[in-house]
Structure formats: C-alpha cells, structure tokens
Amino acid sequence: MRPILMKGHERPLTFLKYNREGDLLFSCAKDHTPTVWFADNGERLGTYRGHNGAVWCCDVSRDSMRLITGSADTTAKLWSVQNGTQLFTFNFDSPARSVDFSIGDKLAVITTDPFMELPSAIHIKRIARDPADQTSESVHVLRGHQGRIARAVWGPLNRTIISAGEDAVIRIWDSETGKLLRESDKETGHKKAITSLAKSVDGSHFVTGSQDKSAKLWDIRTLTLIKTYATERPVNAVTMSPLLDHVVLGGGQDASAVTMTDHRAGKFEAKFFDKILQEEIGGVKGHFGPINALAFNPDGKSFSSGGEDGYVRLHHFDPDYFNIKI
C-alpha cells in the first residue's frame, strides 16, 4: 500500500472530509486556505481563499455544491464547491471550531470557542437554498459546555445534536427545543479532553477520541458505552470504516517525548482496531508529526490522514486488507 503524498498546506492539518460520492477530499489546515483534492489520485483541484485564520473544520453538502468552513478568524463561511466563491459569512464573537450540515442540508450546527468572558456555544443556523436569502440568525444557541467544544454533529433524523469537548463530557441536545437530554456517565466516560468525534455510516453509533489515550464507541440514541479502544498515546483523530468493522485512531505522543529523536522517521501511525473485539490489528506509519485528521472514503477502499507535518497522506488499500482475520 503506497500512500499518495498530497502537499498543499504550509501548516498543520486540522480536518479532512470526503464528499458523499467519495471522489473529492476537502482538507482544512492552520494556513487559512481549505483545499479540495481528487480523492483517487491526490491531485489538487482548487482552494477556497477568504479566511484569515486557521480553518478548524469543514463539511460538504450531500450534492457537493456547498462547502461550510469554521475558522479561528471568528467566522464560518459558505462556499460554492465548484468555483470557490464565498456565498455567505456567519460572524461570531469567538473562533468557530466545528461545523456540520444536517441531513438534507437545511440546517447547520456551528460551535464557537470560549473567549475572554464568553462561554463556548453551539449555534444552529438555517441554510437557505438560495445564497441570496441566507441570514445569519441562529435558530437556537445552546450553552452548557465547560471549555472548548471539539465537535458537534447531528443525531438521527436531525432530532438531536451530539457535542463533546474539553470537559470530557458528551452531551445530547434536543435540536427543536435546545434542551439538554443526556450527558455521558463520569464513570464510563473519558477522563480527559475529547479531541474528536465521528459517526458511523448508518448514524446508529459514534466514536470519540480523547487525550486520555483511548477511543470509545457509543450508542447515538441512548449514549450507552459500547466499546473502549486503549492505546499508548493521546488520540487526536478517529474514524470508522464504512465497509468493515474497523476503527482507526490517529494521535501524537506526550509532549515530554517529543524532543527524543528517533532513527525511524515517520513513526506516527494510524492504528487500526477491530471494532468488535477491541484488538489492534495493524498500523499505517508515515507522518513526521502527530496525526490531527483522519477520514475514510465512503466506499471503504481508501482512507486519508492529515498530520502536524502539513501533509495529507492518501492510502488505497491492498486487496489483502479486506481479508484480515483475527
């Protein structure tokens, strides 16, 4: 499995997202410029210029027409995927950390960081079909998280919003009323800040990664803990295969170990776990810094990772990957 190295970002990667067909890959980095690539050969297709801060997150609409990005410049922007023009800018009072389109793309959830006296918040916005009709009013603003919210996504049928972040608590909110419905259990939950969250393809469960060196699999409706995947280093990124029962974790190492030089360059690896048995089944090395972003192609035949080293590595699986037995 030879990776395709995609060099287009000058700063560390923050987020990766495939479109629904899996032919385009969108990447966000701290260099202000979200980029779109062809997902089969890693060719750069174009960039989206307009942010003037790190871009933390993006999402693409089901029809691959709209891109939404959240940035440290305190804005979230809507773009035309096709020609890279800005369609609308949502302005906030603090950095926009996470963005997620609802099923049907009529709503978006945007989270903002705490800043000065301002607490973190989850904003629900209506997304107009015609950009000319777009307004910046929030349908709801949800507050209750302590510290930064790493990720907020829509639950089944857009009825709920699942959020997680620095306070290590996963919360489920009613998207109609803005009420808090559930919180993850202190005993079974993460012990340190949650860095990432990814839903399964069918939307029935999701996986979270945390600085407590583990990832956990949860039921999306009941918030029951299903599985825990333990590893030796903080987890910065998680994703799940849409095809096989595999969970992939990407991470860094403890700050204390960073200065230790290693003769094996590119030792930062994406670790594959069996979703059911919680066993590690393999790893893909190659990055020269912690892995900050992971995404699986919707067809399950390739995945990409984005690192602190500014590279996106695109991996097309060999046939024997599909026959791994434990």
Image (cartoon, helix red, strand yellow):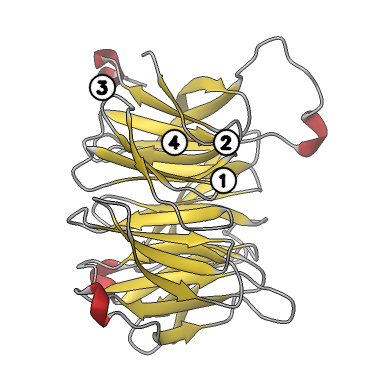
The residue that mark 4 highlights is 248
The residue that mark 2 highlights is 10
Label 3 CA crowd tier, 10 Å (few <14, some 14–19, many 20+): few
Residue type marked 2: Glu
Q: Position of residue 91 (x, y in %)?
A: 50, 76
How far apart marks 4 and 1 lie (CA) works out to 26 Å
Q: Position of residue 82 (x, y in %)?
A: 23, 50
Can you tell which of label 2 and label 3 is closer to the viewer?
2
Residue 79 shows up from this direction: yes
The relative height of residue 72 versus residue 133 in the rendered view (above or below) is above
Label 4 CA crowd tier, 10 Å (few <14, some 14–19, many 20+): many
| Left or right: 315 as drawn, with respect to 209 | left
Assess whether mark 3 and mark 1 are in contact (beta carbons under 8 angstroms): no
Furthest residue in direction bottom, as rendered: 177
Residue type marked 4: Val
How far apart marks 2 and 3 lie (CA) works out to 34 Å
Q: Label for residue 322?
A: 3
Q: Nearer the viewer, residue 268 or 93?
A: 93
The relative height of residue 166 versus residue 202 in the rendered view (above or below) is below
How far apart marks 1 and 2 lie (CA) works out to 6 Å
The tag earlier along the polypeptide, 1 or 2, is: 2
Q: Secondary structure at mark 1?
A: loop
Can you tell which of label 1 and label 3 is closer to the viewer?
1
Q: Quadrant of the C terminus?
A: top left
Assess whether mark 4 and mark 3 are in contact (beta carbons under 8 angstroms): no
Residue type marked 1: Asp
How far apart marks 1 and 3 lie (CA) works out to 36 Å
The residue that mark 1 highlights is 31
Q: Secondary structure at mark 3?
A: helix
How far apart marks 3 and 4 lie (CA) works out to 15 Å
